[in-house]
Image (tube, rainbow, N blue to C red):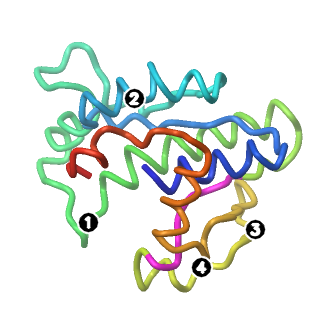
Amino acid sequence: GKDSLALCLYLKNNGIRFTPVFIDTGHEHPDTYHYIHNYLSTIFTNIEVIREELYFKEDSAFKGGFEQLVDLNKEFPSVLRRSCTKHLKMRPLIRYLNKKRKETRAKPISCSGIRWQESSKRSKLSEIEDIDEATWWRPVISWTEKNIIDYINENNVKPTPLYIDGGA
């Protein structure tokens, strides 16, 4: 999304070495996949795509990711049951961070492009938080949506076509 894009630009512009990670839920718009693989990959050449392989079984009657999650759990995710976030986003991210921790023998720093303005729950988060698997750093947490959009524009980077077309 736009917040993650602004975060990546911020890190790059400040000379901070990082690996952009796209967590594939299997339920993204085709324009999102095209944008990441054919546009963003020219700006950030080291994008890693991770996903929860448990929900990407080839022998399933359902498309990978979200559809297999719904089929296996026999329910749709909701605000109360955030199974999509838990299973398709957080589990593969935690696994990725643990792998990096093992490889480097150091606690990784996970940067997130979330902002206080997005929700009351997020408004309570701090910029830096130390959790078991990583130190979480949220450099753009205090930015407004306008700050995010202005920063992307100042860097002459095109947002995903979904924002331009009003689909996001």
Q: Label 3 amino acid?
A: Asp
Give the residue type that dot 2 points to.
Tyr
What is the C-alpha distance between the residues marked 4 and 3?
12 Å
Sequence-wise, the earlier of marks 2 and 1 is: 2
- Residues 26 and 157: in front is 157
Q: Is residue 62 above or below residue 141?
A: above
Q: CA distance from mark 2 to mark 3?
A: 32 Å
Mark-to-mark CA distance, 2 and 1: 30 Å
Secondary structure of the residue carrying numbered label 3: strand
For the residue labelled by badge 2, is the local secondary structure a helix, a strand or a loop? helix
Q: Is residue 114 magenta?
A: yes
Q: Amino acid at mark 4?
A: Leu
Quadrant in the picture for residue 69: top left
Q: Nearer the viewer, residue 64 or 159?
A: 159
Mark 1 vs 4, N-terminal side? 1
Residue named by callout 3: 130
Q: Mark 4 falls on what kind of element?
A: loop
Tell me: 110 left or right of 81: right
Furthest residue to the right? 105
**Residue 5 locus on image (x, y percent):** 54, 47
Residue labelled with disc 1: 81
- Residue at the disc numbered 2: 35
Q: Are marks 4 and 2 in contact (CB under 8 Å)?
A: no
Classify 10 Å Cα crowding around label 1: few (below 14), some (14-19), many (20 and above).
few
